[in-house]
Image: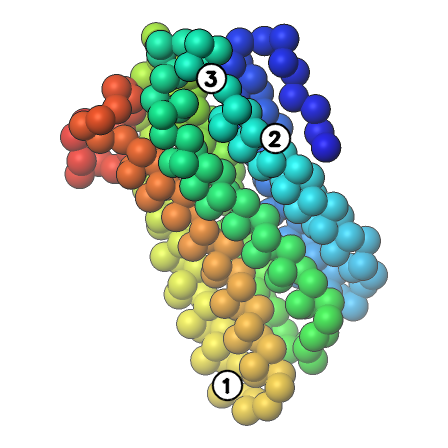
């Protein structure tokens, strides 16, 4: 189990552990294009699959540490500012749960690519590679968005707008949907066998990585509202 420094105030620990989690998650997602490239060129890709699995395990451990941090801290420890976190630990756990889905689906994609090992169809693999690149771009935005959200939660003087990052994530997810559709059309236009089914499964999994990122932003929106004091703007069309 990865240790959490208990000598610092609760807010600092929450920020630091979240940052560590996001770092591992970012590394997990950014390994996806490398994996697809290695598979496309028939290079050795086993080590990349292993790395993604290891990073997903790191994410699991840090998620457990975050859950313990949020659920075991008492009101005195968190202080007045963070009483909301203490009272609504379930919402924080849901947020980290949505983040962990990103790591889980990334690992599932890597494992299924290695297990299925579909016939290499260049047009389909090009689409899969593009979806992996979109996942990396969206993850870069999501890392900043979540960091800003948690800082706003933990720091009395902090306020932020994450609308630009959230809008970018939603745009990348829309682009991924379009590429997924093209991959499916290409796969089933040429093949109506296990190869087409395999590419459909891989495309759906990669699209699921971006869907999970959008779910994170939706959860953050649900965590802001009339019963909170968070000074943060998430969706431009809403006012808090």
Q: Sequence order check: which comes first, mark 2 or mark 1?
A: 2
Residue 171 locus on image (x, y percent): 36, 50
The quadrant of the image that shows the C terminus is top left
Residue in the picture at 35% in, 48% down: 170
Tag shown at residue 188: 1
The quadrant of the image that shows the N terminus is top right
Residue 212 locus on image (x, y percent): 45, 51
Residue in the picture at 60% in, 40% down: 25
Mark 3–mark 1 contact, CB under 8 Å? Answer: no
Report if residue 136 is visible in the image. no
Left/right placement of residue 97 relative to residue 166 reads right
Decide which of 33, 218 is in the foreground and name it. 218
Tag shown at residue 65: 2
Distance, label 2 to label 1, CA atoms, is 44 Å
Q: Does dot 1 land on a helix, a strand or a loop? A: helix
195 shown above or below 36: below
92 shown above or below 31: above
Q: Badge 3 local density, few (<14 within 10 Å), some, or many (20+)?
A: some
Q: Sequence order check: which comes first, mark 3 or mark 1?
A: 3
Q: Badge 2 local density, few (<14 within 10 Å), some, or many (20+)?
A: some
Q: Does dot 3 land on a helix, a strand or a loop? A: loop
Dot in front, 2 or 3: 3
Residue in the picture at 59% in, 53% down: 104
Dot in front, 3 or 1: 3
Q: Badge 1 local density, few (<14 within 10 Å), some, or many (20+)?
A: some
Decide which of 209, 34 is in the foreground and name it. 209
Mark 2–mark 1 contact, CB under 8 Å? Answer: no
Tag shown at residue 74: 3
Distance, label 2 to label 3, CA atoms, is 16 Å
């Amino acid at each position: 189990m990865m240790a959490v420094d208990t000598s610092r105030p609760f807010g600092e620990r929450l920020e630091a552990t979240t940052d560590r989690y996001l770092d591992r998650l970012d590394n997990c997602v950014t390994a996806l294009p490398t994996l697809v490239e290695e598979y496309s060129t028939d290079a050795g890709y086993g080590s990349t699959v292993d790395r993604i699995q290891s990073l997903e395990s790191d994410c699991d451990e840090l998620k457990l540490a975050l859950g313990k941090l949020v659920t075991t801290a008492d009101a005195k420890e968190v202080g007045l500012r963070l009483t909301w976190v203490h009272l609504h630990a379930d919402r924080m756990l849901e947020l980290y749960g949505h983040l962990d889905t990103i790591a889980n689906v990334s690992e599932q994609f890597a494992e299924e690519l290695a297990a299925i090992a579909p016939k290499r169809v260049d047009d389909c693999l090009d689409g899969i590679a593009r979806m992996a690149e979109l996942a990396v771009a969206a993850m870069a935005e999501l890392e900043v968005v979540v960091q800003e959200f948690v800082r706003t939660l933990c720091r009395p003087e902090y306020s932020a707008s994450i609308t630009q990052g959230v809008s970018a994530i939603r745009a990348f997810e829309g682009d991924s949907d379009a590429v997924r559709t093209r991959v499916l059309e290409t796969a089933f236009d040429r093949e109506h066998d296990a190869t087409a089914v395999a590419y459909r499964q891989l495309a759906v999994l990669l699209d699921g990585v971006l869907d999970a990122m959008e779910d994170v932003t939706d959860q953050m929106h649900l965590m802001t509202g009339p019963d909170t004091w968070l000074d943060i703007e998430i969706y431009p069309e809403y006012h808090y």
